[in-house]
């Protein structure tokens, strides 16, 4: 059995341990990226519509590529979805997280609200201490 590689487009033998790779965000249509980011945040189209004061239909049209949000709504959407406007537009992030920042963010997302508050307070204290040292 043969499989095409995403990078070279050439066929190579498939092993028994084939893992499905996530498509690169740049190769995903803009609307689909928005939908995936929304779903990762556990939000419905209605949640987004309410937060941005737009109709459910508008959010649906953005996600199907039938229309795009205004710049103002795009910025608000990026903030709500915790992504950059650049990522929404292109699938590339102007300021990607390094490995440690990404790990901190992923762990924080798994925490309950109470512990997130504690973590935030602790992190602010650590930043203040670092500021005092410099």
Image (tube, helix red, strand yellow):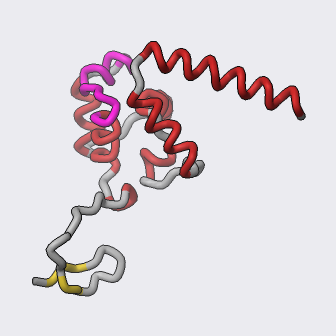
Q: Is residue 120 left or right of residue 92?
A: right
Tell me if residue 74 comes above or below residue 115 in the rendering. Answer: below
Seen at 73% across and 28% down, the residue is: 127
**Residue sitting at the far right:** 134
Residue 104 vs residue 26, the one in the foreground = 104
Q: Is residue 42 magenta?
A: yes
Q: Magenta stretch: dominant SS?
A: helix
Residue 35 rendering spot, x and y as whole percentages: 28, 39
The answer to whether residue 25 shows anywhere in this view is yes
Relative side of 61 to 83, left or right: left
Give the answer, above or below, for where 87 lies relative to 77: below
Q: Position of residue 131 (x, y in %)?
A: 83, 29
Nearest the viewer among 112 and 41 is: 112
Count of all numbered marks drawn on residues in the image: 0
- In which quadrant will I find the C terminus? top right
Above or below, 68 against 90 in this view is: above
Q: In the rendered view, would you say 102 is above or below 111? A: below
In the visual, does 92 lie left or right of 64? Answer: right
Q: Residue at x 68, y 22 (%)?
A: 124
Q: Quadrant of the N terminus?
A: bottom left
**Residue name at image x 32 percent, y 16 percent:** 50
Q: In x, y percent, where is residue 113? A: 43, 16
Queried whether the magenta region covers residue 46, the answer comes back as yes
Q: Observer-nearest residue: 60 or 99?
A: 99
Residue 90, image x, y percentages:
44, 54
- Magenta residues (range): 39-53
As drawn, the residue found furthest toward the top would be: 114
Rendered residue at 24%/26% (across/down): 44
């Amino acid at each position: 059995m043969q499989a095409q590689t995403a990078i070279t487009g050439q066929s190579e033998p498939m092993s028994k341990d084939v893992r499905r790779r996530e498509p690169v965000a740049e190769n995903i249509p803009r609307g689909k990226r928005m939908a995936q980011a929304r779903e990762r945040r556990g939000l419905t189209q209605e949640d987004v519509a309410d937060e941005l004061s737009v109709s459910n239909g508008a959010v649906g049209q953005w996600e199907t590529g039938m229309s795009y949000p205004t710049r103002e709504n795009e910025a608000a959407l990026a903030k709500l979805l915790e992504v950059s406007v650049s990522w929404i537009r292109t699938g590339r992030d102007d300021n990607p997280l390094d490995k440690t920042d990404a790990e901190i963010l992923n762990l924080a997302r798994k925490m309950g609200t109470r512990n997130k508050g504690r973590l935030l307070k602790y992190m602010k204290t650590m930043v203040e201490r670092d500021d005092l040292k410099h």
